[in-house]
Image (cartoon, helix red, strand yellow):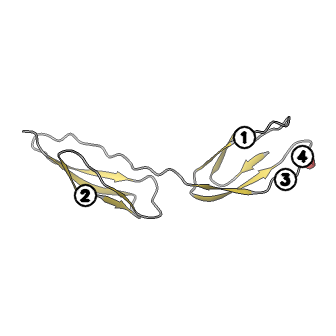
């Protein structure tokens, strides 16, 4: 049996049955949403088996925030610009609120809707 589907990867790519032992595979998706899985049956005895019904799987890809490069502040410099992004745009708004001892952020939070990356200013207190 060889499964297939748009944006789907199967491991192993196909299953070969030699006995009544059940076999499994792992499905990995790269496209959000419901994806159809179709099956092809091959082999000398393929016509003796009822084809599998086409099914579907719902994929929700992992979405992550990109980590900004954090500068070292010193020599009278007390603030820096940070750029943070998301690996995929959200379907609804997602808010990221940073915090850090002795730091202020402007704006105080970033809300991602249709922008892939946003910028904020971080200001630190200079040790004395």
In the picture of the structure, the residue carrying the numbered disc 4 is 46
Alpha-carbon span between mark 2 and mark 1: 48 Å
Q: Residue 117: x, y in percent?
A: 36, 56
**CB-based contact (under 8 Å), mark 1 and mark 4:** no
Secondary element under disc 1, as helix, strand or loop, is loop
Secondary element under disc 2, as helix, strand or loop, is loop
Alpha-carbon span between mark 3 and mark 1: 17 Å
* Foreground tag (3 vs 1): 1
Q: In percent of the image, x 30 and y 43: which residue is there? A: 69
The dot on residue 24 is 1
The dot on residue 108 is 2
Secondary element under disc 4, as helix, strand or loop, is helix
Alpha-carbon span between mark 4 and mark 3: 9 Å
Tell me if mark 3 has few (under 14), some (14-19) or many (20+) residues whose alpha carbon lies within 10 angstroms of its own.
few
Looking at the rendered structure, the number of numbered marks drawn on it comes to 4
Tell me if mark 1 has few (under 14), some (14-19) or many (20+) residues whose alpha carbon lies within 10 angstroms of its own.
few
Alpha-carbon span between mark 1 and mark 4: 19 Å
In the picture of the structure, the residue carrying the numbered disc 3 is 51
Q: In percent of the image, x 55 and y 54: which residue is there? A: 60
Closer to the chain start, of discs 2 and 3, is: 3
Closer to the camera, 19 or 126?
19
Q: Quadrant of the N terminus?
A: top right
Closer to the chain start, of discs 1 and 4, is: 1
Alpha-carbon span between mark 2 and mark 3: 57 Å
């Amino acid at each position: 049996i060889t499964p297939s589907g748009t944006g789907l990867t199967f491991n192993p790519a196909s299953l070969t049955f030699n006995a009544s032992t059940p076999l499994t595979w792992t499905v990995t998706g790269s496209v959000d949403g419901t994806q159809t899985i179709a099956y092809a049956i091959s082999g000398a005895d393929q016509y003796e088996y009822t084809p599998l019904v086409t099914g579907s799987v719902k994929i929700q890809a992992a979405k992550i925030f990109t980590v900004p490069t954090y500068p070292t502040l010193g020599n009278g410099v007390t603030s820096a610009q940070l750029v943070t992004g998301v690996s995929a745009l959200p379907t609804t708004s997602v808010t990221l609120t940073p915090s850090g001892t002795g730091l202020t952020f402007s704006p105080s939070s970033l809300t991602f809707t249709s922008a892939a990356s946003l910028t904020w200013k971080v200001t630190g207190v200079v040790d004395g």
